[in-house]
Amino acid sequence: METQFDAIVVGTGISGGWAAKELCEKGLKTLVLERGRMIKHVEDYPTMNDDPWDYKTGDVITNETRKTQGKQSRTRYTTKESSKHFFVNDLDHPYNETNRFDWMRGYHVGGRSITWGRQSYRLTDFDFEANLKEGVAVDWPIRYKDIAPWYNYVEGYIGVSGQNVGLPQFPDGNYLKPMDMNCVEDHLQSSISKAYKDRILTIGRTAIITEGTKPGLGRMSCQYRARCMRGCPFGAYFSSVSSTLPAAEKTGNMTLRPNSIVHEVMYDADKKRATGVRVIDTETKEVIEFKAKVIFLCASTVASTSILMQSKSEAFPNGMGNASDQLGRNIMDHHLGVGASASTDDFQDKYYFGRRNNGIYIPRFRNIGGDTNQKDFLRGYGYQGGGSRGGWTSKVAEMGYGAQFKEEVLKPGNWSIGLGGFGEVLPYEDNRMTLNYEKLDQWGLPTVTFDATIKENERNMRKDMQQQAVEMLENAGFKNVRGYDGDYALGLGIHEMGTARMGHDPKTSVLNKHNQVHEVPNVFVTDGSSMTSAGNVNPSLTYMALTARAANHAVEELKKMNL
Amino acid sequence: MDRRKALKNIGTGIGAIAVTPTVVGFFQSCQSAVSYTPVFVPQEDFGMLSSIMDLIIPSTDTPGAIELKLPEFIDAYADGVWNEDNKASFKEGWAAFKSAALEASGKANAGQLTAADWDAELAKHLKSGNPPAKGDLAAGFANQLRSLTVNAYKTNEFIGENVLAYAPVPGDYRGCVDLEETTGGKSWSL
């Protein structure tokens, strides 16, 4: 077995796939390690063509599933019959909660890039400058201009459909043609344009091909089946297994090794460089050491942080790169589960064709200067939502039951529409994850303990998120407008981030502006753990752009013999 | 045996089987509710619930609840999906509905209740045009059973593939189209 490589990439999800592609394409012999099982595009999507009646009780979360995936089921959608195999067994992969924390994940090649929500938005300088301006946490060491070309590059490669709207707080991108809106969404869009000067409604920007093809394993345009989470036989949405990993494979430079749990980065104190990683082979139980000149940790926020924490040596008694004591702190997410829904008796003769697995989007309109600034909270939020027709009308209910009722329930009910907020969570030092060495997992490795909650800023923001959603739906003339503020705990947004933040100063941050561990420059961390603040948009696109940018830097530095 | 699966295989198997009277008889016997042992609903109640569901979704020019095995679906669903609270409240509602029907009919035990008795009780709760009063367990049960039956009906394979508008691979999305032209006024099944 070969154990010496130019580069090692830990993880095969959104970030790992990009690191693998970029490093391999730049000529580095790269070992790509994945803790879970192998997944091959299309052939390992067992449920991709299932209809709900193919399951005994429909496509729902069953009691049997809750026994082994109790925590993973907290989302109420990820562990349905059609997608539960892409989420971990909680009994095999336990974690601890001082406060409830929803840690949703899948251990397999492709990681959460197979099941992600695909919404793809750019951060802006409102985000990159916020910490500095407000004196919150530490300053981001980069600005929009540093990452913009990489957003452009990533969007062009993966395929993102969307509409350019020319708002400074919602930058335009490199988009494929936008998806259509339905008639209630059109109606809300024009109502908002008339009633508000500070906000707009647009179609969601999603990593789904809407025209032409993209590189990878035969990636083509969306067929509008809305079965993305199960894996797409058309490769229409972006995932590592359909796109970046095949690109890496094609170079002949990649060695992909599943069933390999990385638990430690090895360090040479004389050279002040990492030398490789220590791996447990989950099939043979063997511990193997692999060596490389450069290491990319892309194992996910919690896992990459946990690997650094376990990488203890005389030089790093509290974990690699943790001189600042910031490792594991500042954990963030996007808080959601708050908004409003409504219905209308109008548009009875209208319907849609196809199933669009994308929603509508109302970009941030709070705290971007002037009248938009709020007294009660910092930062902002966006809304995601959509309109649909379902259920049956009150007219049908009055028929009671029987032959005519039976005919009528087969007709679509009234249109309804919903707006759900996605709000920024601030970085708080005492929102943190730690390792518990008393409770070991089946590999003898420490388990993760979460102790984090949302606080006053988020709670105040939620009030506004609900109120504004109600107001916009009422202004549009919808009926039965109902606000809600549901059950939310950190993690439920499945956007956990920030536990190895980027910053200017090694005393207050873990990573530098190129995602290198300040103290160990040949270790790059490019997943969500690197985020200095959360912004209020879905973060995966940013992880991809940061990864491509960091990989480029790594290769330049290798050429200059700096690593 | 699943009748639809069996029928599907005919004609696609090795040398299409001629459907002789014997084979048809075999399928019909598969349909009978007698062969089903409920896992959630008590055996003695299963027939009663089946006849109530068949009043909600009766057999017309398309199959009704019993023929579509909707009672079997709901029984499996209750067992496999509901938590203990859901199960208990269904049972409580069912007991209230049953005793209300008994009282109205003046009969001594539930076994003597006919479809007409169930129909009268259902009508009381579902044809009044009023939503169920809070705390009225029998009315709550009638509404719940109707919802469950409709849900089972609309996620049924035969209805989903043959009666509702079924498009497993639409290939395109258009947001605002004419209902009649697109699906003939029916809902999409997916």
Image (cartoon, grey):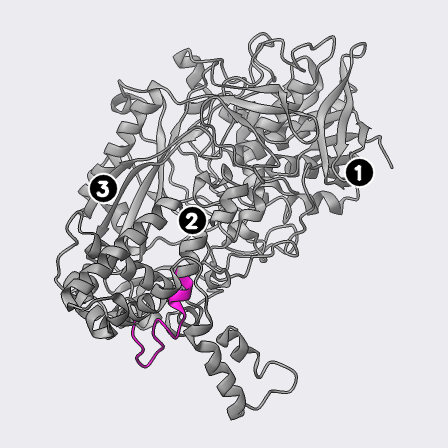
The numbered mark, 3 or 1, whose residue comes first in the sequence reads: 1
The numbered mark, 1 or 2, whose residue comes first in the sequence reads: 1
The front one of B160 and A256 is B160
The front one of A508 and A102 is A102
SS for tag 2? Answer: loop
State the residue at coordinates (64%, 31%).
A298
Q: Is residue A460 above or below residue A538?
A: above
State the residue at coordinates (58%, 40%).
A88
Q: From where the camera sits, is residue B21 visible?
A: yes
- Label 2 belongs to which residue? A358
Q: Mark 2, chain letter? A: A
Indicate the amino acid at tag 2: Asn
Q: On the rendered image, what quadrant is the N terminus of chain A found in?
A: top right
Q: Mark 1, chain letter? A: A
Estimate the spatial distance between the alpha carbons at disc 3 and disc 1, rounded to whole Å.
55 Å
Indicate the amino acid at tag 3: Arg
Q: Quadrant of residue B165?
A: bottom left
Q: In this view, does A362 lie above or below B82?
A: above
Disc 2 crowd rating (10 Å Cα; few below 14, some 14-19, many 20+) is many
Q: Give the range drawn in magenta.
A: B57-74
- Label 1 belongs to which residue? A284
Q: Quadrant of residue A524?
A: top right
Residue A15, percent across and down?
61, 35
- Label 3 belongs to which residue? A482
Does residue A170 appear left or right of residue A557 in this picture? left
| Mark whose residue sits in front, 3 or 1 | 1
Indicate the amino acid at tag 1: Thr
Estimate the spatial distance between the alpha carbons at disc 1 and disc 2, rounded to whole Å.
42 Å
SS for tag 3? Answer: strand
Q: Quadrant of residue A68?
A: top right
